[in-house]
Every structure is written in C-alpha cells, then in structure tokens.
C-alpha cells in the first residue's frame, strides 16, 4: 500500500500569501497533487493508496477528482480534524483510521516531489525497509548513512543533520505496516518535537533489521516543497 501524508500546514506557502494547501496549487495545467502522483502509475493497479489530509477546502472531493483523472481506482481518503506533529504522526493516524492490514507492505511518499516513474528495488525481498536517496549536501534534508561506500545497508538516519552524502527524496519503504507502527510508537513515545519519518529507521536498525538505500540520480527528481521551488517550476512550465 502507498500512504501519502498531506496534512501539513504548508506554512511557508501561507507566509507567501497562498491560502490553499500546496497540493491544490497548479503548475500550468496540472495540480501538484497530480504531478506528485503520476510517477506511481505503474502501481495504480497494484497497490491501494491512502491519502491522509486535513478536513479543509473540500480536500476529499479534490483528491477524489484528481484520482479519477489519474486513473487511481483503489484508494481511501482519511480526513483529520487537527494538525499533526509531523509526517510520521500523519501516517500513523492514517493507518489506524483506515484499518489497514498490518502485514501489508508500506510505501510512504511526499506530496510535493515529482518523479517520472517510481520502481521497487529488485532486492526488495531481502530488505525490511529502504529509503530512496540522491547524493547531496546541506542541513535541510533527511539523511541515511551506510556501512561504507560499497554497501547499501543503512547504519544510521538523521533529520536535518548531514551525516552522509545520501539525502532522502521523501520515498520510504517498510516491509510491513506493523513494522512501521511499532517503530513509530517506540521511537517517538517520549518525543514531543516534530515527528519525521527517516529517524524511525534507527529503532529498526538497533534491532538488526535490514534497512537499505536505493540511490538515484539527482536529476530524476523535482522538489516543489517551498515557494521558491514552486515559482521556479511554474516559470519553466510557462515558458
């Protein structure tokens, strides 16, 4: 199953004067929602999609209409009444509310990142989880550190702290839903700060679960999570 957390405040866009959630904003002919999801077209008839949003601006109707345009037939829209403390909590609440099969595979993805086509690693059966990454730097990314240069096995993850050259694209995989849920509850049980997804893997790594990276070229992914990136994409598509 694919879970899309989209219950954030879009605070940077709000500060810029936007009133709608960023996934409802358009880049010429298509919404950010549409552009984020079309890369999953190979999965439309394979996985169920769960969209977790807030009950604002008729979000459920918007999502249903966009899914119809995309050709996504098997999906659920979970509407939350309140703002969550981060993507990890949004996913957690969405899974609980949707009453999903705890043994299902779980893919999690941002709603503001575009890629032409997503695929599952060939070695997926040997993994308990993975993060899709690109090579980058800076303190505004989620990071995964591997055993060494020749290994894809992750030994540590961190949020907004550069511990390696591997930056997350925002795509996360867990072999089972209950693996994510157990790790979420254990890792964040005494944490009141914003709850990100990448650090959850540290709990699984400590228990010797097999967590890996899937490295892709930076040019394959487009980020549109802040107004400046949105304006740049808008200019490119309007030219």
Image (tube, helix red, strand yellow):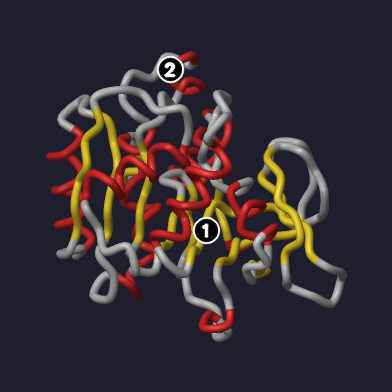
Residue 152: x and y in percent read: 73, 73
Viewer-proximal residue among 226 and 5: 5
Work out whether 180 lies above or below 137.
Answer: below
Q: Residue at x 60, y 61 (%)?
A: 131
Camera-nearest label, 2 or 1: 1
Crowding near the residue tagged with mark 2, few <14, some 14–19, many ≥20 C-alpha atoms within 10 Å? some
Q: Describe residue 169's horizontal placement relative to residue 32 as left or right.
A: right
Q: Residue at x 12, y 40 (%)?
A: 61
- Residue 14's label in the rendered image is 2
Q: Describe residue 103's horizontal placement relative to residue 160 as left or right.
A: left
SS assignment at label 2: helix
Q: Describe residue 164's horizontal placement relative to residue 92 as left or right.
A: right
**Residue 216 visible in this rendered orientation of the protein:** no
Viewer-proximal residue among 190 and 85: 190
SS assignment at label 1: strand
**Marks 2 and 1, how far apart in space?**
27 Å
Viewer-proximal residue among 185 and 84: 185
Viewer-proximal residue among 108 and 112: 108
**Residue 202 visible in this rendered orientation of the protein:** yes
Residue 186: x and y in percent read: 54, 44
Q: Which residue is mark 1?
A: 172
**The N terminus is located in which quarter?**
bottom left
Crowding near the residue tagged with mark 1, few <14, some 14–19, many ≥20 C-alpha atoms within 10 Å? many
Tell which circle, 2 or 1, labels the residue nearer the N-terminal end.
2
């Amino acid at each position: 199953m694919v879970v899309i957390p989209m219950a954030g405040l879009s605070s940077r866009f709000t500060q810029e004067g936007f009133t709608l959630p960023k996934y409802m904003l358009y880049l010429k002919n298509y919404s950010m929602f549409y552009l984020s999801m079309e890369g999953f077209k190979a999965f439309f008839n394979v996985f169920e999609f769960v969209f977790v949003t807030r009950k604002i601006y008729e979000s459920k109707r918007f999502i249903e209409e966009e899914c119809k345009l995309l050709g996504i037939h098997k999906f659920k829209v979970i509407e939350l009444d309140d703002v969550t403390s981060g993507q990890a909590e949004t996913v957690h609440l969405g899974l609980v509310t949707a009453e999903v099969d705890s043994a299902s595979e779980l893919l999690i993805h941002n709603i503001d990142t575009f890629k032409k086509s997503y695929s599952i690693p060939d070695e997926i059966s040997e993994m308990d989880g993975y993060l899709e990454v690109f090579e980058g730097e800076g303190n505004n990314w989620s990071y995964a550190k591997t055993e060494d240069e020749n290994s894809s096995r992750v030994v540590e993850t961190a949020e907004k702290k550069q511990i390696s050259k591997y930056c997350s694209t925002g795509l996360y995989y867990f072999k089972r839903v209950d693996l994510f849920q157990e790790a979420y509850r254990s890792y964040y049980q005494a944490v009141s700060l914003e709850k990100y997804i990448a650090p959850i893997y540290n709990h699984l790594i400590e228990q010797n679960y097999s967590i890996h990276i899937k490295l892709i070229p930076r040019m394959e992914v487009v980020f549109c999570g802040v107004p400046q990136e949105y304006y740049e994409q808008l200019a490119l598509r309007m030219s």
